[in-house]
Amino acid sequence: MNEFPSGASAPRRKIGIIVQRYGVQVNGGAEVHARMVAEQLAQRYDVTVLTSRALDYSDWKPYYAEGPSEENGIRVLRFNNKMREPRKVQGYYGRKARGRHLVQKLHRALGAPGWFTKLFPNAAITDEDGMRWLEAQGPAMPDLLTYLKEKEQEYTAFIAFTALYYPGALSVLTVPQKSIFIPTMHDEKAAYIHFYRKVMAAPAWILFNTRAEQVFSQKLFPIAQVQQRIVGVGIDLLRDRLQPDASVLGALNIKRPYLVYVGRIDSAKGCDVMIEYFLRFLKETGAGLELVLVGKEMMPVPEHPAIIRTGFIPDERKDQLMLQAGALIIPSLYESLSLVLLESFGCGVPVLANGRTEVLHDHIEASKGGWTFTDYDTFKAALEDVVAQRDTKEKGEAGYRYVRDRYSWSTILGYFDEAISDIEARNR
């Protein structure tokens, strides 16, 4: 695979950003986070993104061409990747790697005798099980790991995103002394895979998105000796630079006050519950309210005149839809930061978030920038506030101040500079 030609300007420290998917067409939270960091760091470092050819996380089917390309002025190097293996295979290795296989349960019930292990070697939890689970889930990219071994000395540091997937988890094991890990870890089944104890202990630095993520990780993994910091991400205060453009709403036939959801439209993100609650609210109240869904559909969405589906749209249109919304809804049970919540606050727009998610609950409580819901009744109460415009402006202002004061890029980039300089000093 050909490398990029060197520029004529003075050499800058070379940084590799590793993420499972990359591109303006990709709207996953960690992937958008990686793109934002890449574009910001490129102003002061020589940045190359190392990623897969995949566009869709559901199968990792290769979409982009292999090799070097450019995306929004950022150099991207794409490696061949395998497609996701069947759920049955993922499930087997997931259970095995967490010690939840039937043979392993029986082994523990008997007091873990040695004779049982000799008869049934698969009763043990092995690193191979964790590796196989990561390979089955994908996107498996063995060529990436080979590249890292061969080119390690050319890079000052590597910033790897997301513990959940093969590229991030295995890259920190391949080049641990040069790795800055952004694990986006939260309390889900995968976090209890034993192999992650090894992964999380490997990098030189871990940059957490929130205090909740750090506390959870410190309880679960042996990471006391790893340099750590809570960093998050810088947020563009859209309200300061954009004026509302009503033509965007007109083009989508949005005629009434509306709520907006941004991200994968997926039951795994709680979208089925959100839509069920929204339609029930309309039926009970007759409110003149619409729900705008922005993102790729990964589940059936009911046909209803109050539900508007935009599919994938450019960032400029997405920003306008957030800027002019009555509120943003986030129904997800699993979040490590919630970039879209912070973006909504940067628009001065309040957020209705799933209160069962610790990160979302903490953001809302700390900012006073919206509402949380845990069931239909609390969801309904929040929507009644939105329809009546009860304290919505005050909540929007509170969220805006929260982001302005805590998530400036100058502060965030300073944290990255610190970690990169430390790794450089260690590896001289």
Image: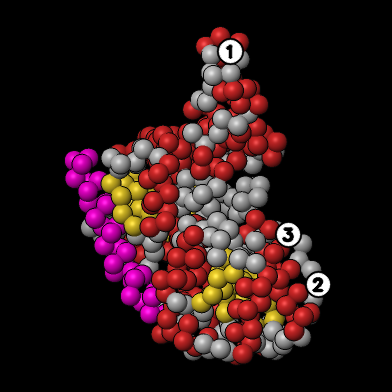
Q: Secondary structure at mark 1?
A: helix
Q: CA distance from mark 3 to mark 1?
A: 44 Å
**Residue ID at (66%, 77%):** 380
Residue 402 percent location from the top left of the image: 38, 75
Residue indicated by mark 1 = 116
Classify residue 155 by image quadrant.
Answer: top left
**Residue ID at (34%, 57%):** 230
Callout 2 environment at 10 Å: few (<14), some (14 to 19), or many (20+)? few
> Which contiguous range is marked in magenta?
400-428
User: Of 225 and 40, which appears nearest the observer?
Assistant: 225
Residue 395 percent location from the top left of the image: 48, 82
Q: Secondary structure at mark 2?
A: loop
Report the predominant secondary structure element of the magenta stretch: helix
Disc on the earlier residue, 1 or 2: 1
Amino acid at circle 3: Met
| Mark carried by residue 299 | 3
Residue 279 percent location from the top left of the image: 75, 74
**Residue ID at (68%, 70%):** 376
Q: Answer left or right for 338 relative to 39.
A: right
Q: Nearer the viewer, mark 1 or mark 2?
A: 1
Q: Is residue 381 visible?
A: yes
**Residue ID at (65%, 55%):** 268
Callout 1 environment at 10 Å: few (<14), some (14 to 19), or many (20+)? some
Amino acid at circle 1: Phe
Q: CA distance from mark 1 to mark 2?
A: 56 Å
Residue indicated by mark 2 = 303
Q: Secondary structure at mark 3?
A: loop
Callout 3 environment at 10 Å: few (<14), some (14 to 19), or many (20+)? few
